[in-house]
Image (cartoon, rainbow, N blue to C red):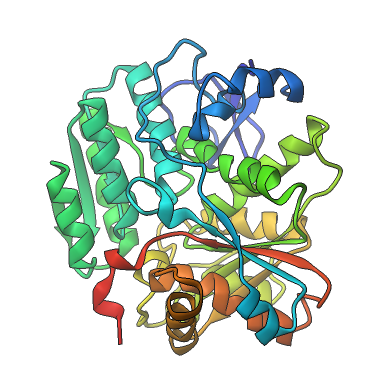
Amino acid sequence: MAEIKSLTCVDCGHGHQAELIYKCERCEGSLDVEYHSEVNGEEAEAAGKKESGIWKYRSFLPIAPNSEPVTLGEGNTPLLRMPSLEMELEQSEVYFKNESANPTLAFKDRALSVALTAAKQFNVEGVVTASTGNTGVSAAAYAARAKLPCKIYVPKKTPNEKLRLMKIFGAEIRLVEGNFSDAYLMAAQQAETTGWFNVTSTFLNPYAVEGNKTIAYEIHEQFGDVPDWIVIPIGAGPLLVACFKGFKELQLAGKTSKLPRMAGVQAASCAPIAAAFENGLEEVAAWKQPIATVASGIADPLTTYPKDGTRTLKTIYASDGCGIAVEDDRMLHYQKKLAKEEGIFAEPSSATAIAALEVMKRKGYLRKNESVVSVITGHGLKDLMSIQ
């Protein structure tokens, strides 16, 4: 089993004990879980046979071996080929990883399962989160499973379907004037005041981010190796960063010699990371232009934490990947195409991962003979108002 060495600051390298902490005590940078030694691939595989879903990878997660996981059966989502898109784009291999098959219909369940298990280890009295929707739904469900109260701060423009689900799971909802960054600040203040565990799905909670790594392990198993490209919708980008970390861990464990190129996709009217990439910048600045997009799930201007965007940008560069911005009309086009031709109903934020492929082809990033996996992060039933 891997043991936590420290929570290491990604900016200054300072190490912290594995405790309830969200940022570096020296420079306030975000934290990454660092382990004492690399996991032995064969040992991890043998240990994983005792559990299912993301918990078959317990050896790669920052959770004590004897801890009972807070689980609803998350993970083990399908990887499916898209022949219609292969023909349209003249691309050899196009797949999608359907994360809408998770218990609350979004990839957030991976992170929240690990976060709530950590919350139980820390014996916290409750959990709090900021959310544009999917994190809130997942946090509410997993908090209910963990028998912990949950308070969620959401922008007033959050889709009603997602608000109803949060209420059904028993969470307390606080509507916030403004955007996600405003909700983020209020949730952080609430966590500091009460001591509740902040499970906001940025880089704030290092334990939650580790849960996202499991998507890499599954893609590796299902694909049979590592695809050339992984395309992921991003707000702050913890799924993209964690996915790449997962593939690096597989490489270190001797399971593969290859790493994928990572493409981070944003809506054109809120694209701080994609804009920084397009301009060849080393740092991401907060988005100050007007935000008007149907992709509410990734419309994060990074107002109070642009360093999170920089962390994602660095991972894109390290993987020789790219940042892509797509217009609303293209994501809605591919949302309909996915439904009519592939039988998958994705929310607009998720459809950006398909719409990005035509941009990647046009700009020369994606070559004809390369394999690509687009991650469908959430279900369309959670954002019906976007349907046109």
Q: Residue at x 34, y 25 (%)?
A: 119
> Is 367 above or below relative to 297?
below
Q: Residue at x 61, y 43 (%)?
A: 218
Residue 313 picture location, percent across and down? 64, 60
Q: Is residue 116 left or right of residue 230?
A: left
Residue 291 picture location, percent across and down? 37, 79
Q: Residue at x 20, y 63 (%)?
A: 161
Q: Is residue 207 left or right of residue 248?
A: left
Corner quadrant of residue 231: bottom right
Q: Note whether residue 245 is visible.
A: no
Q: Is residue 339 left or right of residue 133?
A: right
* Quadrant into which the C terminus falls: bottom left
Q: Note whether residue 216 is visible.
A: yes
> Is 125 above or below relative to 237?
above
> Is 84 above or below relative to 312?
below
Residue 4 picture location, percent across and down? 60, 20
Furthest-top residue in this view? 66
* Quadrant into which the N terminus falls: top right
Q: Residue at x 76, y 51 (%)?
A: 226
> Is 155 above or below relative to 355?
above
Residue 384 picture location, percent across and down? 26, 73
Q: Nearer the viewer, residue 287 or 200?
A: 200
